Amino acid sequence: MRFTKIIERILVTLPIMLGVGIIVFLFMRLTPGDPVDIMMGQGGAVSQGEMAQLRHEFHLDEPIWSQLGYFLADLAHGDLGFSYVQKRPVTELIAERLPATVELAAGALLFALIVAVPIGIISAVRQNTAVDRASMAGAFVGISMPVFWLGIVLILLFSVRLHWLPVSGRVDYDVGLAERTGFYVLDSLLAGNMPALISSLKHLALPSITLGLGVAAIVARVLRSSMIEVLRADYVTLARAKGASEPLVILKHALRNALIPTITVVGLQVGVLLGGNMIVEAVFSWPGLGRLVVNAIFARDFPLIQGAVMVYALTFVMANLLVDILYTYLNPKITL
Amino acid sequence: MEQAAQITFQTWRYGWHIRLRLWGRNLRDFLAQLRRHPLPFLAGLIVIAYILAALLAPAITAHSPIKGNLRARFAPPAWEEGGSLTFPLGADDQGRDLLTRIIFGARVSLAVGLWSVGISVVVGTALGALAGYYRGHLDRYLSRFADLLMAFPFLIFAIGVMAFLGPGFTNLILALTFKGWVEFFRLARGEMMAEKAKEYVEAARVAGQHDLGIIVSEILPNITQSVFVLGTLRMGFFIVTEASLSFLGLGIQPPTPAWGSMVAAGRDYLLTAWWVSTFPGVAILLLVLAINVFGEGLRDILDPRLKIE
């Protein structure tokens, strides 16, 4: 029964992805000039005949709905088009940068959870004490914090003043890390290269904190309020009455149930992680997807921008799909 | 005929008379309650201070926000060694007074915030009210479209739109409102559906009022509070988004002082002049924090049901 619900939920996602593709396509068509004009802007003089030839090759001489058809068909094959500026397929360019971005997002999420879960629990258990008030005030500041400025303040503090952590990049070049998976932490573990591991973790620290702090703030707030609700529930009173120790009551009986609504919020925060990713990568010169896109915008490399926006949107849709599925597993009361 | 029109007009005028008095009373109640919430009250004062600073910018600053004095290049803040009260927060790479530029920057942030929230509120609430009241095809298409827009992370969508439209104030407003109306649409639609089932709407219909009259003068006044609370909370978010776009170089272009691009400009001088990037960021944080505290206070006072996260 639950399995069919999950299949249903996946099927519902398909038209949304189709719609996302159409919106992105329409935006591309809104820009003045077609890809051939932009391409020629980069290259030398080309005759009208050659331009017409190119337009024909890219189907630009056909009606817009048939262009949309080609676009969506390519998309279904995982073909995001061709970057005229970099003279390479967009899929290739994005795939190259993806590990750096995923590593950063994972670091940020990990940081957010390590910080937010204990804070959420303690604030709920010690509700309305000084600890709770201070954490929630901190969370409020975290929510209002502009990500790019947080990054710069952290650089000023930890790199410029204290010289503890590097300002930019993913790893020091002198540690001799051979790239295998593109995830540098994983690569250095696989190679057993200790200096490289330390170096890549050091480089990862500030960007992860910058990107993760806002998420941590929101998760802490949500976890706190759902914990407070759960701690009042009958089964928690029952567990206590049966003589379960307080840590056991909190961690086993209460936390498990409080995590259910929190997971939905974490799923929504994936959107924040993806958006913030562009900014954090710009601040720390992190060579990931976000920097690729920002550079593409200044180079007016529209196929690349369009492909990357597609990837971001699809990741967001998939993340929410995953969260929904996880949610049904965790909470048998809820059906999708 | 003439007499009937006369009566309608009188009823209409009397209706507004009562409504205005009710609003007056609500406002007094609201202010009385606000005084019992010291933090949102303080936050409200900070927001008002920003608005006044933005409005009076040329009157309260002695320097030009655009033209610098190269002899004052990187003048440090007043309390640092070599600093002076001529440049209280120091000067930037072109010798422009940082405080002056921050005060003028408030104009950009507040204007972007007000315009984008304003347009989002009007468009979103109007469409949401119509969709929630009439349902049917209109509701189905609009809701689908709203769902589609929700599939894009906000900042990614805004960056994408700016990439295609190019930088500038108007495009910035467009980029923020393209997706910004959706939250208001959902709120108004939901509230409209809930309100429509209530007795006073039935009464108005029995009394012969048109659908549009019921929506505008019966139901909308009852949902303005929720919309107002959401609008306040979204305002802080839009201001941060504008600053982020300007930071990336996609929003307001230099030399116009915008906080985001000022932080970006100071990035090259972190080693020698930390203040250039730091203070514009403090200005953003303080304003957004104040707006959010005020917004949450408003929600607690006006509408404890509404929670967005």
Image (cartoon, coloured by chain):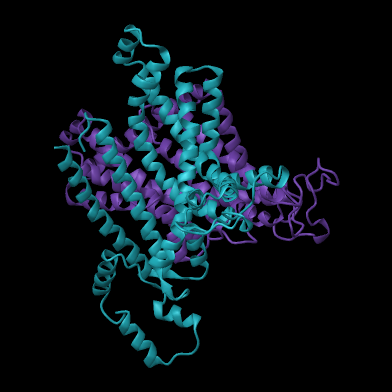
A76 over A313 or under it: above or below: below
Depth check: give the residue in front, A183 or A63: A183
The image position of residue B289, as x and y in percent, is 55, 37
Left or right: A147 with respect to B6? right
State whether residue B9 appears in this view. no
Left or right: B135 with respect to B256? left
Left or right: A116 with respect to A49? right
State whether residue A86 appears in this view. yes
The image position of residue A135, as x and y in percent, is 53, 26
The image position of residue A53, as x and y in percent, is 34, 88
**Which colour denotes chain B?**
purple
Residue that protrudes farthest toward the front in the picture: A192
Residue drawn at (41%, 38%) of the image:
B230
Residue B158's image quarter?
bottom left
Quadrant where the N terminus of chain B is found in the figure: top left
The image position of residue B13, as x and y in percent, is 34, 37
Residue drawn at (53%, 62%) of the image:
B168
Residue drawn at (46%, 58%) of the image:
A180
Which of the chains is cyan? A
